[in-house]
Image (tube, rainbow, N blue to C red):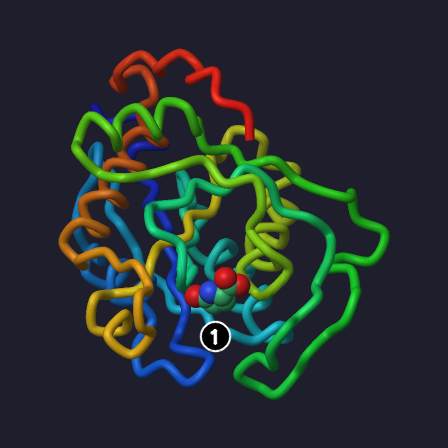
Amino acid sequence: MTPIRHRLPVLITGFDPFAGEAVNPSWEAVRSLDGSRIEGHRVVACQLPTSFSRAPRTLRNALRELQPAGVVCVGQAGGRPQISLERVAINVCDARIADNDGSRPCNEPVVSGGPDAYFTRLPLPACLASLHLAGIPAEISNTAGTYVCNQVMYALLHALRARRRVPAGFVHIPYLPSQALAHRGAPSMPPDLVRSALRVIISVMLNPSKSPPAAPPSGRED
Ligand code: PCA
């Protein structure tokens, strides 16, 4: 008999296009996994609007409806060269550009009176080791920025604060090659590789004991 938690779905989210782009690679990758199974769990994809006012609400509705076994939210980080496993979300919204509703908060909290920050609940070293073993360039990132992605990561971990056993976190991904063409010199990652990366991350999140031992620190200081 399958344990009850096994029957719960995994929620993955991606964003709609913003900043004049025609696509958002996060939604392309996330929707390509919708309905698949990973470690026995059904994957459910949900699109979030790139909107400070609407994204957290959409996410909270999906959490309430699905009661997922785990959550991975994904967003585009144009200019970053590899998969970024975000370590921390901070209680700040500070937008350099307007969101899809024309809103541009400056130095505002995500949650008034909330904790300064939440750490990810993804096992980052295990995720990183598994991604590298699969030949996928990836790094741990210490900032998810102060735009809608950071807000969503914070809102996710805040919404799950009483459900300590639900693993959850945020992953930034590079531009698609088609987007990089319009941003001269910008790095990109093919959609198949991003999709494989997300499968690896979700699999390790659900079953960390199956991942390879994490590599020792490189000793590099930066
Ligand atoms: N990236 C933006 C918001 C939506 C997205 O895909 C960010 O990094 O905040």
Q: Residue at x 58, y 46 (%)?
A: 143
The answer to whether 8 appears left or right of 57 in the picture is left
Establish if 161 lies above or below 221. Answer: below
Dividing the picture into quadrants, the one containing residue 102 is: bottom right
Q: Which residue is situated farthest in the right direction here?
A: 113
Q: Residue at x 39, y 77 (%)?
A: 17
Image quarter hosting the C terminus: top right
Residue 66: image x %, image y %?
42, 53
Q: Residue at x 37, y 64 (%)?
A: 46
Q: Which residue is situated farthest in the front direction here?
A: 185
Establish if 121 lies above or below 103. Answer: above
Which residue was labeled with disc 1?
A: 49
Q: Which residue is situated farthest in the left direction here?
A: 192
Q: Residue at x 20, y 51 (%)?
A: 195
Establish if 76 lies above or below 127. Answer: below
The answer to whether 21 appears left or right of 132 in the picture is right
Can the viewer see residue 4? no
Residue 101: image x %, image y %?
58, 86
Residue 137 vs residue 10, the one in the foreground: 137
The answer to whether 22 appears left or right of 104 in the picture is left
Establish if 199 lies above or below 153. Answer: above
Q: Secondary structure at mark 1?
A: loop
Residue 155: image x %, image y %?
62, 54
Image quarter hosting the N terminus: top left
Residue 11: image x %, image y %?
37, 51
Residue 200 vs residue 18, the one in the foreground: 18
Can the viewer see residue 47? yes
Q: Amino acid at mark 1?
A: Pro
